[in-house]
Amino acid sequence: FSALAPQGVFFTSIKVTDSNLTMSGKARSSADVASLASSFVSGSGGEIISDVSIDSLSAGEDGAYTFTASATLVGAEALVPAIAPSTNSNSDDELEGEL
């Protein structure tokens, strides 16, 4: 995932909720943020995420850009192993699975 970020872009926060991804970060230029969005939707980036949106972009007094982006994880259900009810348990409340 980090290999998709162009040089000059770094993340300050990455949050995953269900199949939604929200990222915040900083970049040297608005062109770097555009390159980030482009790398997410092309090539190997498209295998990981889709529906990329740059939700906010602002320039600071120091010349650095702050951004917030969102996307949908592709195949998110494959990233989280299924937790199935245990068949070896006497209790219906117990679940077994590996996270």
Image: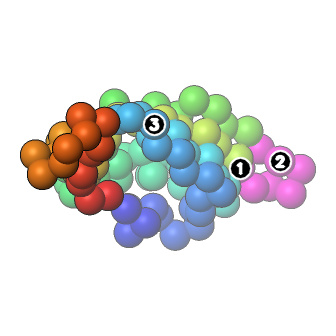
In this view, 64 is above or below 54: below
Tell me where residue 82 sits by quadrant. Answer: top left
Q: Quick one: 77 or 3, which is closer to the camera?
A: 77
Q: Quick one: 67 or 34, which is closer to the camera?
A: 67
Q: Earlier in the sequence, mark 2 or mark 3?
A: 3
Place of residue 50 in the rendered image (x, y in percent of width and height, measured from the top left): 29, 37
Identify the secondary structure beneath mark 3. strand
Per the rendered image, the range of residues in magenta is: 59-65
The residue shown at (53%, 45%) is 15
Identify the secondary structure beneath mark 1. strand
In this view, 97 is above or below 54: below
CA separation in Å, label 2 and label 3: 29 Å
Q: Is residue 75 left or right of residue 17?
A: left
Place of residue 65 in the rendered image (x, y in percent of width and height, measured from the top left): 71, 49
Q: Quadrant of the C terminus?
A: bottom left
The residue shown at (89%, 50%) is 61
Q: Residue furthest front?
A: 90
The amino acid pointed to by label 3 is Thr
Q: Earlier in the sequence, mark 1 or mark 3?
A: 3
The amino acid pointed to by label 1 is Tyr
Taken as a whole, is the magenta stretch helix, strand or loop?
A: loop
- Check whether the beta carbons of the residues at disc 1 and disc 2 lie within 8 A of each other: yes
Identify the secondary structure beneath mark 2. loop
10 Å neighbourhood of mark 2: few (<14), some, or many (≥20)? few
Q: Is residue 20 left or right of residue 89?
A: right
The residue shown at (18%, 48%) is 89
Q: Quick one: 34 or 85, which is closer to the camera?
A: 85
Q: Nearer the viewer, mark 1 or mark 3?
A: 3
* Disc marking residue 65: 1
* Disc marking residue 60: 2
* Disc marking residue 17: 3
The amino acid pointed to by label 2 is Gly
